[in-house]
């Protein structure tokens, strides 16, 4: 983070470190074991350029987390690439298979599904 944040000229307000217990209930869980998390608050311009800058910063931070066998928390904004998402959430393929099993006509959709789940190649609902 010390190298990535200045490289992106990001305005970091604070970081909160949190201890997170293993999550055994959530299907798309990031805490599959006890973890330490870092929640970062940035100031961002509310422009298209500001959004592009934050997307690039987020992708760099996610890449660093993945390089260190970490994950990232699923935020409201979908900045991570599909490849980063699937690497951080290996259970996502099963999650989207179940979604299509119970919603084969894809009645229920949102931006999260459209970015990370809809285009996934799925051979069968029973494949691992």
Image: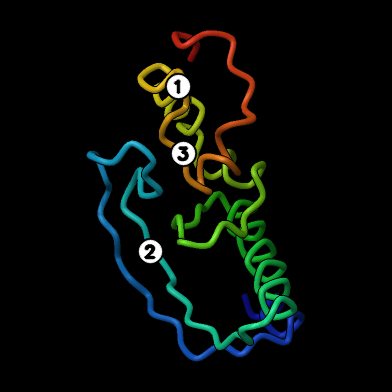
* Residue named by callout 3: 109
- At horizontal 31% and vertical 52% (from top left) the residue drawn is 34
Position of residue 81 measured from the top left corner of the image (x, y, whole percent) = 67, 50
Q: Quadrant of residue 57?
A: bottom right
The reply to whether the C-beta atoms of the residues labelled 2 and 1 are less than 8 Å apart is no
Crowding at mark 1 (Cα within 10 Å: few <14, some 14-19, many 20+): some
Along the viewing direction, whichever of 102 and 32 lies nearer the viewer: 102
The secondary element bearing badge 3 is classed as: loop
Q: Determine whether 57 is above or below 92 in the image.
A: below
Position of residue 89 measured from the top left corner of the image (x, y, whole percent) = 49, 40
Q: Determine whether 123 is above or below 1 in the image.
A: above
Q: Quadrant of residue 68?
A: bottom right
* Residue named by callout 2: 36
Q: State the separation of the CA atoms marked 2 and 3.
A: 32 Å
Along the viewing direction, whichever of 127 and 20 lies nearer the viewer: 127
Q: Determine whether 119 is above or below 115 in the image.
A: above
Q: Quadrant of the N terminus?
A: bottom right
Q: Nearer the viewer, mark 2 or mark 1?
A: 1
* Residue named by callout 1: 100
């Amino acid at each position: 983070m010390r190298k990535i944040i200045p490289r992106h000229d990001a305005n970091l307000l604070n970081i909160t470190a949190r201890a997170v217990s293993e999550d055994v209930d959530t299907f798309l869980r990031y805490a599959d074991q006890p973890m330490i998390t870092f929640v970062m608050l940035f100031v961002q311009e509310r422009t298209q350029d500001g959004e592009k800058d934050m997307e690039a910063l987020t992708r760099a931070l996610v890449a660093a987390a993945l390089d260190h066998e970490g994950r990232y928390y699923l935020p409201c904004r979908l900045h991570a690439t599909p490849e980063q998402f699937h690497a951080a959430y290996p259970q996502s393929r099963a999650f989207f298979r179940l979604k299509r099993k119970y919603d084969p006509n894809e009645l229920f959709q949102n931006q999260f599904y459209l970015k990370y789940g809809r285009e996934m190649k799925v051979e069968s609902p029973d494949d691992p």
